[in-house]
Amino acid sequence: MTTTIQKWGNSQGIRIPKFILEAVHWNGNERLVVSAENDKIIIERAEKRKNIKELFADFQGEYTPAEMDWGEPVGEEIW
């Protein structure tokens, strides 16, 4: 199958046919990682973002909350 790069607003893009999306089990709302390697564009599904419980599921230590000094305001921050 061949396709053409087309201008869309200030960007350019290609359309991915439905049968290809179905073959990789992707839908229209997938988060993707796009990279280039050896004159090829590689499109991969992004890893699902973990929530805080998943990120610390294997943590065996003890948590002690501590305050952090971020320094004096330098702009129009509200403290």
Image (cartoon, rainbow, N blue to C red):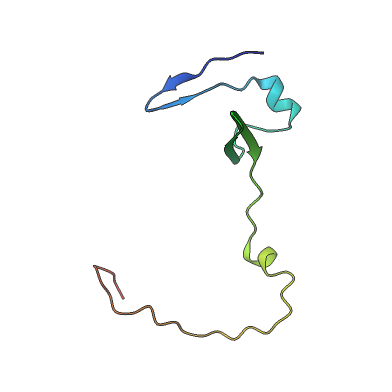
Which of the 4 image quadrants contains residue 79? bottom left
Q: Nearer the viewer, residue 35 or 14?
A: 35
Residue drawn at (55%, 84%), measured in percent from left and top?
A: 65
Q: Position of residue 48 (x, y in %)?
A: 66, 50
Q: Position of residue 58 (x, y in %)?
A: 74, 71
Which of the 4 image quadrants contains residue 51? bottom right
Whether residue 54 is situated above or below residue 29 in the rendered picture? below
Whether residue 44 is situated above or below residue 10 in the rendered picture? below
Q: Nearer the viewer, residue 53 or 7?
A: 7
The answer to whether residue 66 is left or right of residue 40 is left
Whether residue 9 is situated above or below residue 34 in the rendered picture? above
Residue drawn at (40%, 82%), measured in percent from left and top?
A: 69
Disc tally is 0
Q: Position of residue 60 (x, y in %)?
A: 74, 79
Residue drawn at (63%, 33%), measured in percent from left and top?
A: 42
Whether residue 8 is situated above or below residue 58 in the rendered picture? above
Q: Position of residue 74 (x, y in %)?
A: 25, 72
* Quadrant in the picture for the N terminus: top right
User: Outermost residue toward the front?
Assistant: 38
The answer to whether residue 9 is left or right of residue 4 is left
